[in-house]
Amino acid sequence: MLIFFKPSNIFGLVRKVVLIWRPLPEKIKKKPQFVPPKVVYDIAEIFEVEDRLPQKPEPEPEPQPVPLKIRSFDGVPMANLPAVLPKTKLVFRPADAFVFDLVSVASFLALLGSVRFDSPKLDLISFVLGILWLLRTFFRYSNKLARYDLLVNKFLTSKISHRGPGALKYILAEAGSQKAIRAGLTYQWLLDRKQHERDGTTWLKEFLIREGSMGMNSLLDTDEHVFIDTEAALKDVENLGLIKSNDDTEAVEEVVTGQDASDALKKVWNDVFDGVNTSGKNL
């Protein structure tokens, strides 16, 4: 099971939770049958009487994998985070009802303490009150159980935002958005380096990969270090046509700017709408 979190500015609240898991296949229950041990079959084969024994059970086939399930939730409090996990089953236990109804328990103990067995009328009244208390407790517990189930279902349905194909589309959109942000940040970092260095300067990709994460973090307005896959980011920028590199020397020779950069991005957009990726292969 994979769990992805998107933190929130509000303390104790998770902005987005995405769950991806594969349910276990259902086990087929078979009727119990007596099967002799393997040693018995071996001895029967020696004396050629194996046909008198029950047929050897065939090995069980491998269960077919169950399709993946995807769900996403919005605005889940950290305290209630386990409630959205697929294996979590929220159960209203009798102990919970006992905690919620301590006052009734105290009154029941007081009622039992009033039974003296010295007056049949008073004992009969106490007995009737005890039965009424039990009935009242039973109906209150049933009511609380129904309200608890309603609260759980209401919480889950109010927090879930996508499921199945909708959740998959959301993940793909988020991945595309993050990829675009990473490519834009890398391009801006390369432009800044170009402005501070002489024309015609080339950078080895190995150097850019080593220095890229720290350099791009300096452009971010954040106190924590964010890991950035600089190697993948450079490939994305190169596929967009915003940098030109030499495959022989493994170096970036030019950062495309101005009208040339706009033309390169327009070409990529046209290729996308025509069903062709940046490598020239049909999608």
Image: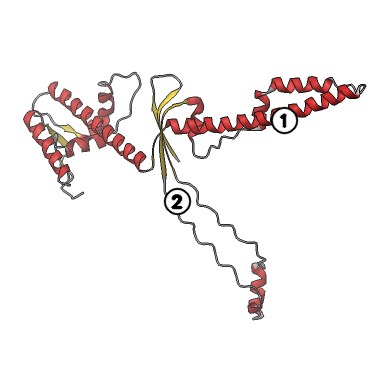
Q: Which class describes the residues within 10 Å of circle 1: few (<14), some (14-19), or many (20+)?
A: few
- Identify the element where label 2 is drawn: loop
Direction from residue 174 to residue 45 in the image, left or right: right
Residue at 70% over, 28% down: 137
Question: Please, which residue is most extreme toward the bottom here?
Answer: 48
Residue underneath mark 1: 135
Q: Residue 36 in the image: x percent, y percent?
A: 67, 68
Residue at 30% over, 30% down: 228
Q: Residue 181 in the image: x percent, y percent?
A: 25, 30
- Identify the element where label 1 is drawn: helix
| Above or below 168: residue 155 | above
| Above or below 23: residue 204 | above
The quarter of the picture where residue 95 lies is: top right
Residue underneath mark 2: 66
Q: Which class describes the residues within 10 Å of circle 2: few (<14), some (14-19), or many (20+)?
A: few
Direction from residue 158 to residue 259 in the image, left or right: left
Q: Residue 179 in the image: x percent, y percent?
A: 26, 34
